[in-house]
Image: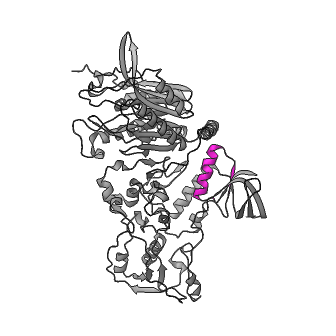
Amino acid sequence: MIRVAIVGAGQAGLSVSHHLTRLGVEHVLLEAATPAHEWADSRWDNFTLVTPNWHCRLPGHVYEGPDPDGFMTRDEVVAWLDDYVRSFDPPVRTHTRVVEARERDGGGFVLDLETPDGPDTLEADDVVVATGGYHRPIEPAFARAIDPSVTQLHSQQYRNADQLPEGGVLVVGTGQSGAQIAEDLHLEGRQVHLALGDAPRVARFHRGRDCMTWLADMGLYDTAVAQYPGGLAAREKTNHYVTGRDGGRDIDLRAFALDGMRLYEPRPRRRGDHVGRLGHRLPARLPLAAGRGVRRDGTPDAHARRDRGARPVLRRPAVDAHVGVRTVPRRRSRRGARRAVHRRRAALGARGGLMRIGAVAAHFGRDLDRALAKVRAIIDSARADGVELLVLPDATLGGYLTDLRDPRADLPPTLAQDDPRLAEVAAAAGDMVVCLGYTESAEVDGEQLRHNAALCVSGDGVLGRHRKVHQPLGESLVYAPGDRFEAFDTPLGRLGMLIDYDKTFPESARSLALDGARVVACLSAWPASVTDRASRLPQDRQSRLFDLYDSARAAENQVVWASSNQTGVLGGLRFLGQAKVVGPGGDVLARTWSKGGIAVADVDVEHEVARSRRVLHHLDELRPDSYVTTGREPS
């Protein structure tokens, strides 16, 4: 009897196994051959991915090679997947085929197996079927009626042109495999007859960017099938054809035709036909066909005209970077979510592992009750998605200033350190660690001061505090500055906090890193330029600086960086959004662009920080005696 049986050890089954391993759940993978074998056994010799390498993101395993915008070959994909298997040693039973799964009296399942030692059975509480839909070739019935003297190969069996007898070759279908195999044969000098299907064409590059990157930015890859235009039927549609060969380029059937390939239009079968029928041969100068089902507002140009913040989430667990509108998994009860977090933390404490970090881009105004309700909703959504560290923006409760030139006009409400609203956020956090910003009211030497403050809490109470030290423009007219940068311990490890303008100064993040912080949470209410605002946020000078500081501070100190920010408009200020999670090498693992959302990334913090410091350890190699630590008197 086993807790979970996973049928199939391809990338889907291995991903499920990785998650169960993290959670300490007993399971087994049942694989009819060997893990991910179809990549080695069912791809042609010149096969390449059609998606850029940075798309290759499995839980806990991302492409980290030298060519993120290139396209891995078959053998490189096989090696990458082999590395994944070795990274966590999943419990796989190879050459074990599941013949049947049936319900067991009293619950659970019984699986009938074919093994190298003969028939066997296995009982499991739960079964995950991860076989995919492509391992069984689809062959039309008329193929059996073709004369046996004609060599027939399914695309799954094709390796190279030398497999085929001399002479012309008919390729049926122009999906991704058909179009690429036709090109492979054409480049080998064979006379190719290509029977066209209904797959649409797409340009490999548009405005200097890969088409897959555009689709990712537009949210396609994170849109659930049920939400996609066309609904569930969308999954039956044929993908656009394109190739990653020779660094990536178009597949242009018109160019094939001009170069001697013979193209044939599809022709419906007639009643009584026993074989397929080719339609008329098409002329070499084909018209440019429009893609099926592509709406005008769903094109890259339309997307480029809109604010890029229309894409709420880019998930890269150092990568899963499929971008776009992220679907939230089925909500668990709070008790169930807490149990899952306890299991995860127990596993992390025992052997190290991934931490799921969420950085929030959202709008918060003056209404404290509304802000508190929004915070609860964000926490619940993040908890359902397995987030363990959640970083909310600066001024989460009560909002930020409305005018930096004259900040006194509409000040945010203040909260004392023991305000019950802060205790409510801690209670809502439960097993999560949550950072948020607010305006703190404090009495010092009989004077009532206000601070731009950040608070880190969990269900156990306050874990750490920070008061903003550096103040831009007129902020000093209404806020008193803080005077220190200190890291603190949390259930997830040592953490430090900064508030927006603090990150402009390298010494701020450096102080936290020297104090042992492995993760720095930078909470911001960072607006677009006040003096020279661009018409579009991505082109604004402050937008570029905001991103630059996030990556630079992470890379300088070799820490994981979680950067949140306000969105929308408050008074005369328009906020950038652009929440993100950054790795210790300065690489952005997840981001939200300028609209609201949560940038979520899975990061093995201790491993990634240690790896980044393995050769060049910036903190150990400081030379403080050589630095000027104080500037001249201001003029």
Residue drawn 78% across and 62% down?
120
Q: Nearer the viewer, residue 532 or 9?
A: 532
Give the position of the C terminus as an image quadrant.
Answer: top left
Q: Is residue 596 left or right of residue 137?
A: left
User: From what the image shows, is residue 313 above or below residue 153?
Assistant: above
Q: Nearer the viewer, residue 2 or 250?
A: 2
**Dominant secondary-structure state across the stretch colored magenta:** helix
The image shows a total of numbered marks equal to 0
Q: Please tell me whether residue 484 belongs to the stretch shown in magenta.
A: no
Q: Nearer the viewer, residue 29 or 223?
A: 223
Span colored in magenta: 9-29
Q: Is residue 634 left or right of residue 377?
A: left
Residue drawn 41% across and 47% down?
312
Which scheme is used to colour this image of the protein? one colour
Q: Please tell me whether residue 13 belongs to the stretch shown in magenta.
A: yes
Residue 257 position, x and y percent, is 36, 80
Residue 530 position, x and y percent, is 24, 35
Residue 558 seen in this snapshot: no
Residue 374 position, x and y percent, is 44, 37
Residue 586 position, x and y percent, is 42, 41
Residue 459 seen in this snapshot: yes
User: From what the image shows, is residue 564 above or below residue 452?
Assistant: below
Which quadrant holds residue 151?
bottom right
Q: Is residue 80 left or right of residue 467?
A: right
Residue drawn 50% across and 40% down?
357
Q: Is residue 501 left or right of residue 485?
A: left
